[in-house]
Image (cartoon, helix red, strand yellow):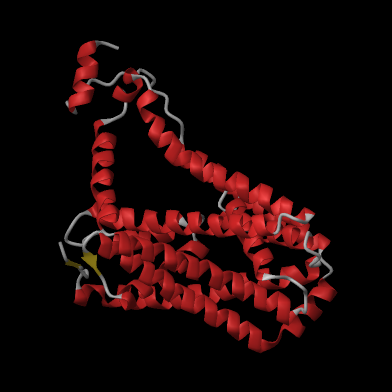
Amino acid sequence: MSDEYLERVETGQPVPSIDTDTTKPDRPQRSKLLLCVKVAVGVTLCAIIVARVDWHAASRSLAATGIGLVAVMLGILIALVFVSAYKWRLLLSIHGVEYSTLRLSRYYFVALFFNNFLPTSIGGDGYRIYKTINNGRSKASAIIAVVMERVTGFGTLLALGAGAAVLLAADAAGRLTLLGVGAASACIAALPLAWRMRTLVPRRWRAAVPASVRRLKATVVEHMDDYIRQPLRSSGVIVISIVFHVGLAFAYFVLIRYGADQKISMLQMMSVLALTTFVAVLPISFNGLGVYEGTFIYLLAQYGVPPDVSVVPMILNRGLLIVLSLIGAGVYFLDTAGFASRGAPRADVTH
């Protein structure tokens, strides 16, 4: 690679293509194959769960749960949608973009619809970015707000799970969850470490990075400064993340502790939920189907909760998410029907 080529890359000037391989993989075909593999993994895991659960006992556990506790879980899930929308609003406001919580809540319900009926949860995130992309400041603000919502939520969940696992480490089950959550936290911690070590990458390799990627990096750095300049709002994002995950863990805790009369604690539920969520985000199944349920059931079994009991909140969770998704579908079709007359909504820029 010549010095002239490196100089052109560093300055963002056009460079001649060095790709001499004209045979490129069939990406659509590869994507379909990957999707089929994920569906197969999910179906296989679900089949294993079905085979190992005593469904007569599970039906009794479901009946014993009662409509009251199911309504409590549905109410908590609906409330958490509005909590998430408010967190999203706060992240956008950090970048100087203002949307109402009600409008973002509508977008969030629609995103749930896409998340549960598309092959990947990126569909819901893509919709939320699309609806806030014309915000008056920058497209990056919409993208970074959604990414930061994911990152802060996942990081907070791992921190809560790690803290709970440390307190539970006196017993064997607690050590198991501590090991799992610790490994997950190490994976997340490796990301900023890798970022700090980027200067060790050879100059020639860095020069091969496309100019568009370098411009994207500069844009991200510029927007990340917003969080430094507004520490109170940034701290508020973490507090809201804590409220969200504690609320979700409480929903599961209520079903198992009071619906099935199992002696489970909030600390145990928090550690199980953290590790379950981490495993479920691995791209090995369709929307975590089978992976999420199987991990949850296995980990709760370490605390003495039988599978015919722990499968109940998993069934209710999937069912109630479908209910929320149907709400989102209704909102989506109403918005689509009225889009032509209203036009695309825009946000107010505060700075």
> In this picture, is 245 found above or below 289?
below
Picture residue at 53% right of the left edge, 67% below the top: 245
Name of the residue lying farthest toward the top: 2
Quadrant in the picture for residue 104:
bottom left
137 or 180: nearer the eye? 180
31 or 251: nearer the eye? 251
> In this picture, is 258 found above or below 348?
below
Residue 92 spot, x, y in % from top left: 28, 63
Q: How many marks?
A: 0
Q: Is residue 120 visible?
A: no
Residue 339 spot, x, y in % from top left: 25, 73
Q: Is residue 11 visible?
A: yes
Picture residue at 79% right of the left edge, 67% below the top: 305
Left or right: where 282 falls relative to 194: right
Left or right: where 15 falls relative to 232: left
Residue 279 spot, x, y in % from top left: 62, 51
Picture residue at 24% right of the left edge, 44% below the top: 219
Name of the residue lying farthest toward the bottom: 68
Left or right: where 345 falls relative to 189: left
Picture residue at 60% right of the left edge, 74% below the top: 250
Quadrant in the picture for residue 331:
bottom left
> In this picture, is 279 found above or below 28?
below
Residue 143 spot, x, y in % from top left: 31, 54
Image quarter where the C terminus lies is bottom left
Image quarter where the N terminus lies is top left
